[in-house]
Amino acid sequence: MKLGNYIEQVFPLFNIRFIAINDSIDSFKNPSSTNTILVPFKNLINDEYARDTSVKIRTSLNGKKKKGEFIGAFASYGYIKDPKDKHKLIIDETVSDIVKKIFDWNVNYGLGKIAICHKLNELGILNPTGHKRIELKQNYNNYGIQKKQYNWSPSTVRKILNNEVYIGNTVQGKRRTKSYKVHKVEAVPKEEWVVVPNTHEPIIDKETFEKAQELGRRDTKVSQKTKELSVWAGFLKCNDCKRAMNKKTSTNKYGKKYEYFICSTYRKKSNTLCTKHSIKQEDLEKVVLEAINLHIDLLIGVEEIVRQVDEYSFADKDKKNMKHIINMKQNEINEISNFKQMLYEDWKKEYITKEEYVEYKQKYENDLEKLKQNIENLQSEQQKCEYEEKADYEWIKEFKKDKHIKKLSRDIMMELIDSIYIHENKEITIKFNFEDEFVLSKYTKEVRWQHLLQEIY
């Protein structure tokens, strides 16, 4: 055993005195006391006691996990521990709308994790670490605390978008220590996580959460030119190699520019691995619209869709939350302005030096400038919410009027389509979310529809 080795060899080598008062052991006064059989025997007993205690604690905690009781030190962002029951989570009303915004920006507006970070930082929203530390006054520590950095990062947004806690599930056991002797923390495979559904009130509905997971699996890079997410991003695939299609722009002999898609394997790797599978964007949009409208007429029923989209509306809670945050920022401005005025008086009364006055004054001015910028961004976001609430989605208006979709959007694609496969012979195979398939030819205008009992791919 390691302890016996230290007592018998290491400590004497470095002239270290070992004392165990309860066992009457002193290596300096009575060197032979360390050689008694009681020392290794007691070491063995102590080690077994530590192992037994560790097993009992792990068993108890695992039992709580399986019952859906929360055993973590800190709740996930958007939740707090119930004051009446520390093993139960309740919604943190102060930031739950921020969680909803993150999912809304990702699912309904197609914003990626970096774009969402920029929006949150521009609005002056504290990240989960800052919220726990500053707003909830919790004794929460990580590397960002020492640096006083409370900005959002893509990894933080990714964790929120992937966390099942927001649909009411308790997910625990993601990490563990190797043993009671080795305290190194290791990640646990996902299939071994302890997931208990419906243990608390959800913030996000399951449909929105699943859409966010699907977006995470797709290639949804925002265009560097337009700064917008393409309608087709993550949906188009080559029918042969099953890789993504790349968007290209070209000019014909008459000087007219047009956009088309081409197999990424052919373009980036080798023309021997796959063929072009090219198709113009306008042709693609035409046949996909035709397929969607036929699919709607055949499978869903127009009146049911109209009833569902009529239920769509923006909640007033978003506007109230924005107003609340703006008021909080304005209160911070008033408070810092008062500090700045008092700072001048302290300098005149020689409570602080001139150097301290200049330093604090500069800090307060920087804080005020940052808060004013936050308020401008918040007011801009508030106006945007009000505009969107009044101006319903264009495709919904058209659909209500003509019972026919005339323009594609990310919402329609996410709702109805799983994948679109481009054939070399200009055919397009559309795999819907309802286990049905359309095959359309842009030349013959023929449409074939097949109902499948299982997924095709």
Image (tube, rainbow, N blue to C red):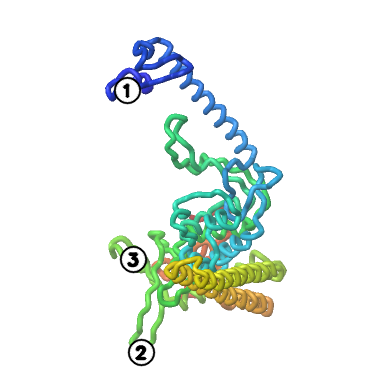
Q: Secondary structure at mark 3?
A: loop
Foreground: disc 1 or disc 3: 1
Between residues 296 and 229, which one lies in front from this camera angle? Answer: 229
Q: Secondary structure at mark 2?
A: loop
Q: Residues within 10 Å of mark 2 (few under 14, many from 20)?
A: few
- Identity of the residue drawn at 46% across and 22% down: 47
The three-letter code of the residue at mark 1 reads Phe
The residue that disc 2 covers is 254
The residue that disc 3 covers is 275
Between residues 415 and 315, which one lies in front from this camera angle? Answer: 315
Tell me the quarter of the picture where residue 104 sits.
Answer: bottom right
Q: Is residue 300 shown above or below 199?
A: below
Q: CA distance from mark 2 to mark 3?
A: 27 Å
**Whole-percent x, y for residue 108 in the image:** 57, 67
- Identity of the residue drawn at 64% across and 70% down: 327
Q: Is residue 137 shown above or below 107?
A: above
**Whole-percent x, y for residue 180 in the image:** 47, 30
Quadrant in the picture for the N terminus? top left
Closer to the N terminus: mark 1 or mark 2? Answer: 1
- Identity of the residue drawn at 55% across and 54% down: 133
Q: Is residue 294 shown above or below 144?
A: below
The residue that disc 1 covers is 11
The three-letter code of the residue at mark 2 reads Tyr
**Whole-percent x, y for residue 239 in the image:** 42, 62
Between residues 413 and 93, which one lies in front from this camera angle? Answer: 93
**Whole-percent x, y for residue 304 in the image:** 71, 67
Q: Which mark is residue 117?
A: none
**Residue 288 visible here:** no
